[in-house]
Amino acid sequence: FVGDARRPYAPRPAPPGGLEAAPLLRPGQSGQATSFTQIEHVDTQAPANAQPALIYIDGRAVDMQRYEFPGFVDPSRLRFETLEPVDKSTLHHPSRGCLNEIYATAICGNDLTSSVLYTIGVTATMSGQLAPICLFLVGLVLYLFKSVYGEAGTAIPLNGGAYNLLLNTTSKSIASLAACLTILSYIATAVVSATECVTYASNLCPWIDVYWGTIILLFIFCVLSILGITESAVVAVGIFIVHMGSMVFLIFVAGVYTLQNPSIFAENLRSPLKYDWPLSILFGFCVAMLGVTGFETSANYIEEQQKGVFPKTLFNSWLVVFILNPILSVVCMGVLSLPTLEAHHRDVLAKTAYDAGGKYFGLWISADAALVLAGSVLTAFVGVTGLVRRLALDRLLPQVLLAENRFRRTNHLIPITFFILCVILFMALGGRVRSLASVYTLSFLGVMTLFALGNMILKYKRGRIRRSIRATWPTCFAALAAVLVALVGNVVMAPGNLIYFLVYFALVAGVTLIMFERIRILKYFLYFVSQGPQHLQVRQ
């Protein structure tokens, strides 16, 4: 406590000569007010690390961030108080900077590499024998985004991905749109991946019920997320290593089979295309962009990564996609004919393993597919936890979500809320998630588009921010153009998916909009109540 203006007020005249008035409180005086001309001259006698003083009016603290001028008041109604310094240890979250390169790569890598399970078949359906070229082009586009994400992440190393980038370059309302797209993408990722995972598992073990198995799987990863990101990362590394080993072995076995039976690959090369070759490459490229979903996830837990790890995570993720996807597409065409690829587009890798390596190898690849899809669910929980925590800190979502449990010091309400939303959506769809899969594609491409735009605005508005990676302007424009082509192409090929996307996006955006405009909504509510019947109004 420094001074209380409610004590006897004895103003002093200002010094002559047009100078500033004397300080409100003289050094050494405990509370005798002398003048009220320059508040910044108050001598608080507080330590240097103390918090700024709050102003109290009629015993109520004034929030200077949301303060509305109530009119002129008598200085005797003002009181000054100094807050206690904040303990810096409470600001340091235990998960900050705990992920090394392997952990960080594995978390986003599971989602990234699980996309190949259905991308190869769909791309072959649209572009035929040109599918490896389409997947190669997608790898080049991802190389451009590696620089775009690297520049934004090293300039503003905070969780939130596209939301955080747009928040620092545009307005909060525009950034909230990116947040809604990202949350919708994570919901679709969790529900679709969990359903596909249990579907694969039910093919191996027919006694597994897909409906309840999906809910149980979502619950398991909810609990794992509550335990902490380190424990989640350990599980993610195990899944990632098993999956990468399985893919390398599949390439070897299918490659040997192709060399022994070259006629299948030669026949596929002679097959006619569905469209002219430019359209085949274009349509194949559009659907192949789904094979890089998960690349954006690393930016949503950048604070949990050790210093300098984020650029390495981006490079590792790009390298895996650039090498793995085209090679897998080639060996699949060396084992299966194009009609077979189209017929088995949902389990093309398992069918390739079955034909090239036998029944048990096919079962192993099916089990690996279920495992990596489960890892994709884990990635969704990790990504949404970092994003929602940032949104709650920025007051776009209820701050109650920031509550920490005393056992693990994790924000347990975030994964619990996410689990409930996923289960409600899954039950509302009756377990049929095909419409949600289309939403997944458009929301992912929307997030990538906003990130490219946000990085270009960052370069223009805040070019002086220090960053270790810089993407050139041609790189930014090329990345933006490529993802826009993919977005428009997917809408043109399946216009009905746009309706599903708008419906789901409206639901997510509606909740965020209510939180964002809650003050204005409450003011309107109070106004209408004040204009209503007398019994609805509260009188003091």
Image: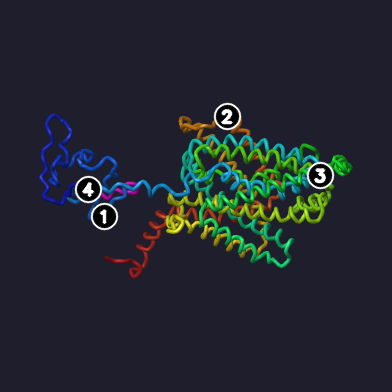
Which quadrant holds residue 20?
Answer: top left
**Which structural element holds mark 1?**
strand
Q: Amino acid at mark 3?
A: Met
Quarter of the image that includes the C terminus = bottom left
Magenta stretch bounds: 64-71
Of callouts 3 and 4, which one flags the residue occurring earlier in the amino acid sequence?
A: 4
Q: Which residue is at 76% across, 53% downward?
A: 350
Q: CA distance from mark 4 to mark 2?
A: 51 Å
- Coordinates of residue 436 in the picture (x, y in percent): 64, 56
Crowding around mark 1 (Cα neighbors within 10 Å: few <14, some 14 to 19, many 20+) is: few
Q: Amino acid at mark 1?
A: Arg
> Which residue is identified by label 1?
60
Q: Nearer the viewer, mark 2 or mark 3?
A: 3
Q: Amino acid at mark 2?
A: Thr
Of callouts 2 and 1, which one flags the residue occurring earlier in the amino acid sequence?
A: 1
Instruction: Please tell me which residue lies in front, 98 or 501.
Output: 98
Q: Is residue 162 placed above or below 367 in the rendered structure?
A: above
Instruction: Please tell me which residue lies in front, 370 or 397.
Output: 370
The numbered mark at residue 80 is 4
**Which structural element holds mark 3?**
helix
Crowding around mark 4 (Cα neighbors within 10 Å: few <14, some 14 to 19, many 20+) is: some
Q: Amino acid at mark 4?
A: Phe
